[in-house]
Amino acid sequence: MKTTLWNPIRGCHKISTGCKHCYIELGDKKHGRDFDTIEVTHQYDHPIRKNKKGEYVIPSGTLVYTCFSSDFLLEDIDIYRHDFWSMIKERSDLTFLFLTKRIERFMDVMPSDFESSYPHVHVGVSVENQEMADLRLPYLMKAPIKHKSIICQPLISPINLSLYLQGIELVVVGGEASKDGRIMDLSWVDAIRKECLQAHIDFSYRQAASNTMKQGILYRIPWNKLTKDAHETIFKT
Ligand code: SF4
């Protein structure tokens, strides 16, 4: 499937401990931008832009990673939300995927026809520990979203997801990518994988943490080896 990025907004505000090493904030710091200033970008209307032939620039069938330079459910974005929902509805031939740590706002900001007109929207809720899982996932369970995922990244403590797996299509797990990032123990990953297997839910282990623990031994892994080499060498069992 073809993929593309649609980042109509940039900037965010930290909301929980999972935001500690936010990669958007890091990128903004490098470029001298104020991360807490929320700005519209040049990609604002990207999904409905057309070329000279009158065809949409984003081809039909594309998976659109949506708002990966902010949190799509951020309060500051509400003034633009009508436009965003309207563009998403117009492009029902695409798949839109956004991730959020603010799923408790979903019911208040979704369009009234969400259930019937937005089956092409996939939502992933990020939870970094049990406290955030218990807080956020009940909202995900209640929301009338057809395609739901749980994103345990950065995983910074064990999480029991068993109460929240009904209606979930995919669980993603990954560690924190930062030299001084928090430790992820592979036994926590394995426990989540087993819960998913038991519940017949797809599971994806996205990456190790820069500081990964296996059987009591701490491995410090360079960022460029997190996704591939770590598993082929260090963690192969
Ligand atoms: S919610 Fe996401 S984008 Fe916003 S500060 Fe936290 S990690 Fe960064």
Image (tube, helix red, strand yellow):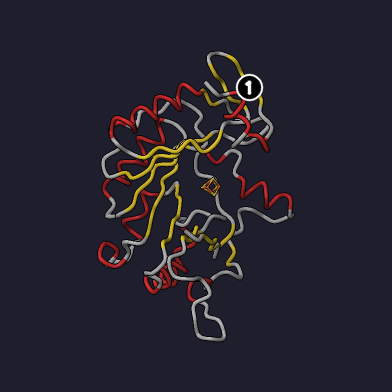
Q: Does residue 13 lie above or below 63 as drawn?
A: above
Taking 237 as reference, is 135 left or right? left
- Residue at 60% x, 36% y is 228
Quickly name the residue at label 1.
Answer: 219
On screen, residue 145 versus residue 204, left or right, reads left
Q: Position of residue 185 (x, y in %)?
A: 51, 23
Front residue (pair 98, 196): 196
Q: Residue at x 56, y 24 (%)?
A: 235
Q: Residue at x 55, y 81 (%)?
A: 51
x and y percentages locating residue 177 in the rendered image: 62, 36
> Circle 1 — which element?
strand
Residue 29 horizontal/vertical position (percent): 71, 49
Left or right: 96 in relation to 27: left
Please, what is the three-letter code of the amino acid marked with disc 1? Tyr
Residue farthest top in this picture: 216
At x 36% / y 38%, what residue is drawn? 135
Mark 1 crowdedness (10 Å alpha carbons): few <14, some 14-19, many ≥20:
some
Picture coordinates of residue 123, whole percent (x, y): 39, 52
Instruction: Find residue 236 and report its image quarter.
Output: top right
Vertically, is 101 above or below 67?
above
Q: Is residue 200 left or right of residue 188?
A: left
Considering only vertical position in the picture, is 48 above or below 198? Answer: below
